Image (cartoon, rainbow, N blue to C red):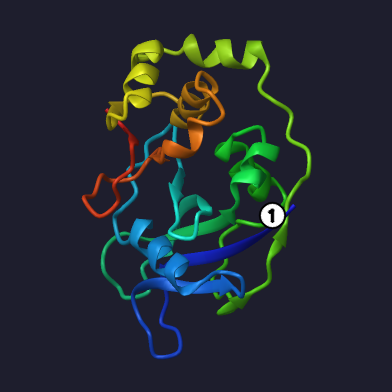
Amino acid sequence: MIVDQAIFTSLDQDGTAGYHLASRSRGVTEPEAVAAATWSPSHEGLAIDPANSVSFQFFPLPSGRFAVARTCQGPPEYSGRAGRLVYTHILFITNEQLRRAGDSPIAIARDAFVLGRSIYQADPRSTLDAIELSDHYPRQSEPYRRDITAQADMPNLDQTISQLRSGRNVRLQFSGDRVLLVERLLGGMKPEEIPQVSFSTSLVPSAIRPFRLILSPR
């Protein structure tokens, strides 16, 4: 399937310095670009730990599409301030594409990375091409689902799913693999419920990024 893409990071580019939407494909509209920049983290916005070196995000866009994002660290900040650059690669998908991916935003993000579509770029072009992802996504197997439930410090999954279904926002602190935890939670929900659950797996919480489900280190 063909999807639009964008990159949010800190670059000194064409007279614009600091964190901004540095690149996007032509199909990304201006309202989508503004929303993607608002939901993406800037300096020191990652909350990673030994079990989670990147963060995955999923959130709605004003066009009706959804964003699936992967945030990682880059090299030290070019500005010379402490810390490393934060780099977010964003995919723009339709509800139909989400359904084709087995209703799994993580499967789409993982696919993009394996295909080399979301790897860190030090100097990306300002105008990108839309990218091609896989057309077939196998659903999770039961042994895979059971593996995540066996991890230590696992929250009560049924209770968390119930809270999400009721419309509540949920914040969980978990020291294990938070990407697998999100997959297990979404796997316990109905397909039509999943688009309502925006999430981040390893970002510093922020009022300007109103994720329904926020996962963070202990």
The kind of residue on which mark 1 rests is Gly
For the residue pair 107 and 115, the one nearer the viewer reads as 107
Q: Is residue 104 above or below residue 75?
A: above
Quadrant position of the C terminus in the picture: top left
Given the current orientation, which residue lies at the most extreme left position? 207
For the question of whether residue 174 can be seen, the reply is no
- In depth, the one of 214 and 30 nearer the eye is 30
Residue 66 appears at what percent x and percent y?
A: 51, 51
Q: Quadrant of residue 41?
A: bottom left
User: Looking at this view, is 43 or 61 the one in front?
Assistant: 61
**Which residue is outermost to the bottom?**
15
Number of disc labels:
1
The secondary structure type at the circle numbered 1 is: loop
Whether 10 is drawn above or below 134: the answer is below
When asked about the image quadrant of residue 82, the answer is bottom left
Q: Quadrant of residue 178?
A: top left
Q: Residue at x 38, y 24 (%)?
A: 165
Q: Is residue 148 left or right of residue 135?
A: left
Q: Residues within 10 Å of mark 1 (few under 14, many from 20)?
A: few
Q: Residue 71: image x %, image y %?
A: 46, 52
Residue ranking furthest to the right:
135
Q: Nearer the viewer, residue 50 or 171?
A: 171
Residue 183 shows in this picture? yes
Residue drawn 56% across and 38% down? 106
- Going by the image, does 112 lie left or right of 151? right
Question: Residue drawn 50% across and 54% down?
Answer: 64
Relative to 190, is 46 above or below?
below
Residue with the mark numbered 1: 116
Q: Position of residue 58 (x, y in %)?
A: 46, 45
Image location (x, y in percent) of residue 101: 67, 38
The residue that appears at 40% across and 14% down in the rendered structure is: 157
